[in-house]
């Protein structure tokens, strides 16, 4: 396999498919743990991603990052026909904190479609080393996208994304008392904040803000069990913006109020101190 062109990151082709709208097509929002590329060959319709809906038509190119809920809806009168490419190992960082992007290739050379059709042909014929050929064609396609001077985006290998997720997690654990927001975490990781949040969720099973709240809850439980700080002080030292917000988060997470939790901790400690030491411990004490 040839090396990626300068500027391109390592990636792996997962699949390339050709689809055309038919009456049994059901458009259901779905999420993939990898990046998808779409090229509209014919027809028109809509592309739905997260909370946005955009019209798509012939010669439109769509890039949607991993972890983004999306689907396509076809026009009944002009059925959608498009090619979908799934690949892992790359993420795209778009201007304006977008999670996906749509652009037209109508007035540009047909080289993008040429490489896409070549990949489809290789997949269909399955000649010797066709997978290697398709992988190389994908790398050329990505390089062609990078060359677009009027379309600002960056690519990053998935290993970098995982590294940044670990960095964010450690930062939260060390700085949970500070005022942490998605914007500040995005600035720290140098990633699009929406993709950063989705990547973190896929990696750890919860959003970075949810993890921040959980970290603060654990810190507050330690303070409640081992100090005499007031509830207001506990909320402050654990990083919560107010006592009322702390009370809401604590009750939702632990199923009891902070006061009830502190009381149960003290009762447990009292009961433990009243227990008679085991015989082995008593004998050891007598020996000493």
Image: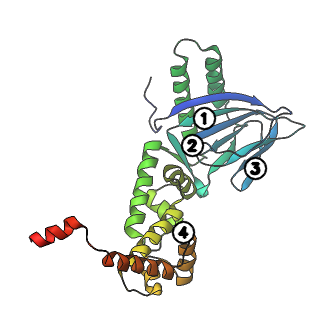
Question: Which comes before the other along the chain, label 1 or label 3?
Answer: 3
Q: How many residues crowd mark 3 within 10 Å: few (<14), some (14–19), many (20+)?
A: few
The answer to whether the residues at label 4 and label 2 have Cβ atoms under 8 Å apart is: no
The residue at which mark 2 appears reads as: 33
* Mark 2 element type: loop
Q: Nearer the viewer, residue 176 or 104?
A: 176
| Mark linked to residue 39 | none
Q: Nearer the viewer, residue 153 or 64?
A: 64
Q: Say which of marks 4 and 1 sits in front.
A: 4
Would you place residue 229 above or below residue 192 in this image? Answer: below
Which image quadrant is residue 173 in? Answer: bottom left
Which image quadrant is residue 271 in? Answer: bottom left
Q: CA–CA distance between discs 1 and 2?
A: 10 Å
Would you place residue 194 above or below residue 91 in this image? Answer: below
* Mark 3 element type: strand
Q: CA–CA distance between discs 3 and 2?
A: 22 Å
| Mark linked to residue 86 | 1
* Mark 1 element type: strand
Residue 182 at x, y percent in the picture: 53, 64
The single residue placed furthest to the right in the displayed view is 77
Q: Say which of marks 3 and 2 sits in front.
A: 2
Report whether residue 177 is seen: no
The residue at which mark 3 appears reads as: 54
Q: CA–CA distance between discs 4 and 2?
A: 28 Å
Q: Say which of marks 1 and 2 sits in front.
A: 2
The residue at which mark 4 appears reads as: 253
Task: Give the position of the N terminus as an image quadrant.
Answer: top left
Task: Give the position of the C terminus as an image quadrant.
Answer: bottom left
The residue shown at (43%, 87%) is 230
């Amino acid at each position: 396999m040839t090396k990626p062109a300068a500027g391109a990151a390592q990636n792996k082709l997962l699949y390339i498919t050709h689809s055309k709208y038919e009456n049994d097509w059901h458009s259901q929002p779905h999420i993939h743990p990898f990046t998808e590329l779409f090229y509209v060959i014919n027809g028109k319709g809509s592309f739905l991603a997260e909370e946005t809906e955009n019209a798509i038509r012939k010669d439109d190119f769509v890039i949607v990052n991993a972890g983004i809920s999306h689907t396509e809806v076809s026009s009944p009168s002009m059925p959608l026909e498009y090619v979908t490419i799934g690949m892992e190992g790359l993420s795209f960082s778009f201007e304006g904190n977008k999670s996906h992007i749509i652009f037209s290739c109508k007035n540009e050379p047909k080289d993008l479609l040429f490489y896409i059709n070549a990949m489809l042909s290789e997949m269909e014929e399955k000649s010797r080393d066709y997978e290697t050929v398709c992988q190389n064609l994908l790398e050329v396609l990505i390089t062609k996208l990078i060359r677009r001077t009027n379309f600002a985006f960056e690519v990053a290998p998935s290993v970098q994304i995982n590294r940044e997720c670990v960095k964010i997690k450690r930062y939260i654990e060390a700085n949970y008392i500070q005022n942490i927001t998605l914007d500040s975490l995005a600035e720290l990781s140098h990633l699009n904040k929406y993709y950063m949040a989705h990547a973190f969720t896929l990696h750890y099973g919860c959003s970075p803000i949810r993890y921040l709240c959980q970290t603060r809850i654990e810190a507050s439980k330690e303070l409640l069990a081992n100090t005499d700080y007031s509830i207001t002080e506990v909320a402050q030292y654990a990083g919560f913006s107010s006592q009322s917000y702390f009370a809401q988060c604590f009750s939702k997470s632990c199923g009891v109020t902070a006061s009830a939790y502190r009381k149960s901790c003290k009762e447990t400690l009292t009961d433990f101190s009243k227990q008679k030491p085991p015989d082995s411990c008593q004998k050891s004490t007598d020996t000493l």
